[in-house]
Amino acid sequence: MEDSQGLKEKREPKRWFPSKGHGSKGKSPMEDQVKLAAIAISLDVRLRSSDMPVYMQEHALRCTRRLLDSPPKPRPSLTNLARAIKKEFDSVYGPAWQCVIGTSFGSFVTHSPGGFLYFSIDSFSILLFKTEVELVTKEELSQRI
């Protein structure tokens, strides 16, 4: 990525444990991971892979469990569930989030740094990731055509 001065930004390597900026105030990354593990157990969730701050992971897990457990019964369709999670993350963390939910799928995605979570809840697997959005003006669009 280039900044406003045209200098290339050096990306840090991905870590299993979040960096200091991803944790809660005053807590170590390990304490955050232990708290997240306890939350996952209490919500009957299995975390599979993540490149996301702990507080956002917690938000995703709690939001998903709430949507699955709230009326009306029967549960919402997988499409409606994916839409609700995507809209929640778009509204709280900005666009553009993508959400894929199913019982059997393969994937290979490119995501924004700090914007990837893959987890299982009940019988579903959920892939939530953020993509970059580039706004294009009408003038730029006409030049591209």
Image: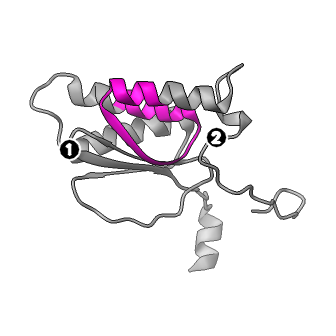
Kindly indicate the quadrant of the structure image that contains residue 80: top left
Residue 123, label in figure: 1
Circle 2 crowding by C-alpha within 10 Å: few under 14, some 14–19, many from 20: many
142 left or right, relative to 116: right
Query: Considering the image in quadrants, where does the N terminus appear?
Result: bottom right
Q: Residue furthest left?
A: 74
Circle 1 crowding by C-alpha within 10 Å: few under 14, some 14–19, many from 20: few
Q: Residue at x 88, y 63 (%)?
A: 7
Determine if the magenta segment contains residue 81. no
Q: Is residue 77 above or below residue 127?
A: above
Q: Is residue 25 above or below residue 143?
A: above
**Residue placed under numbered mark 2 in the picture:** 18
79 left or right, relative to 97: left
Mark 1 is on which residue type?
A: Ser
- Out of 48 and 93, give the one closest to the viewer: 48
- Out of 70 and 11, give the one closest to the viewer: 11
Instruction: Decide if residue 55 is in sight here.
Output: no
51 left or right, relative to 85: right
Kind of element beneath mark 1: loop
Q: Residue at x 90, y 59 (%)?
A: 5
Tell me residue 97's x, y (percent): 47, 48
Tell me residue 83's x, y (percent): 32, 43
Whichever of labels 1 and 2 marks the residue nearer the N terminus, that label is: 2
